Image (cartoon, rainbow, N blue to C red):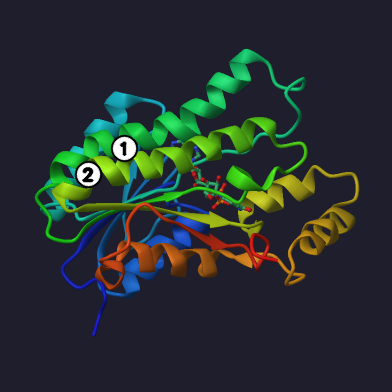
Amino acid sequence: MSDFAGLKALVTGGASGIGRATAELLAERGAQVAVLDLDPSSVDKPLLAYRADVTDDTEVREAVAAVVADLGGLDILINNAGIGAQGTVEDNDDAEWHRVLDVNVVGMVRAARAALPHLRESRHAAIVNTCSIAATAGLPQRALYSATKGAVYSLTLAMAADHLREGIRVNCVNPGTADTPWIGRLLSKAPDPAAERAALEARQPTGRLVSAAEVAGAIAYLASPLSGATTGTALAVDGGMQGL
Ligand code: NAD
């Protein structure tokens, strides 16, 4: 039996990496899935593609309205669009802080604001935010990125409390370093990409990067009726990094 039969899902940042793997998994399991992305040109059927920038409130509202019109409702929001930032607090200026916070934190707020009126109409409403181990791990050279994910974690808990009685569950996943195009871009800029990859792998207790499919599996669980009693949690998908 499909876990998602009859359910309608929207995945932000769903054209690549974790979002793409999640959109494909939900569709395989029977959901109707819409992808919202800055560049959805690579998105194929059965996924539906919508172009929007999560930093633009009007674009997000219009895209969510189009998704709801096309799918006939919305049950699941996967708030996943995000960007990286490297360095200590001395390395990023105010403009960079505002830019990354705008995508990683306010972008999730915008999508949630647009989706909530429709999620209230669902009997299986769920929001899953893509957070990160950076929210709690104290990673070096990731001050700004970690702060944005710390905010996503707190936002998840606050939203879970606010929307519990409306029947809307809100959870997040905390991936460790996941093998996605994002990491490919990061490695391609390193002086020695192979050594940098080995260092990232060594940071994981399992000695390997997490796969996008493994993160998608955790997101799908939190989005599905199988996790119906779970809200306000962070599920680590980090190869044991948090617990070991
Ligand atoms: P990715 O770069 O492969 O995919 C991100 C997607 O988000 C892209 O399709 C991109 O176009 C889209 N996007 C970026 N900015 C956007 C905007 N302003 N509006 C709309 N779409 C936008 O990255 P990924 O590795 O799959 O990361 C996805 C999420 O997972 C992010 O929130 C990231 O912080 C989180 N995460 C990633 C890792 C990792 O190691 N890859 C680890 C922990 C958490």
Residue pointed to by mark 1: 111
Task: Find the residue positioned furthest to the bottom.
Answer: 1
Q: Residues within 10 Å of mark 1 (few under 14, many from 20)?
A: many
The foreground one among 228 and 191 is 228
The foreground one among 159 and 223 is 159
Q: How many marks?
A: 2
Q: Amino acid at mark 2?
A: His
The foreground one among 198 and 236 is 236
| In this rendering, position of residue 218 left or right of residue 174 | left
The percent position of residue 112, horizontal first and vertical second, equals: 29, 39
In the rendered structure, find residue 163 and report the number of the disc placed on it.
2
Which of the 4 image quarters holds residue 135? top right
**9 to 89, vertically: above or below:** below
The percent position of residue 148, horizontal first and vertical second, equals: 54, 34
Quadrant where the N terminus is found in the figure: bottom left
Q: Is residue 46 visible?
A: no
| In this rendering, position of residue 191 left or right of residue 64 | right
The foreground one among 221 and 189 is 221
In the rendered structure, find residue 92 and report the number of the disc placed on it.
none
| Residue depicted at x 63% and y 66% | 210
Quadrant where the C terminus is found in the figure: bottom right
**229 to 191, vertically: above or below:** below
Give the foreground label among 1 and 2.
2
Q: Residues within 10 Å of mark 2 (few under 14, many from 20)?
A: some
Q: Is residue 112 visible?
A: yes
Q: Earlier in the sequence, mark 1 or mark 2?
A: 1
Q: Amino acid at mark 1?
A: Ala
| Residue depicted at x 61% and y 46% | 136
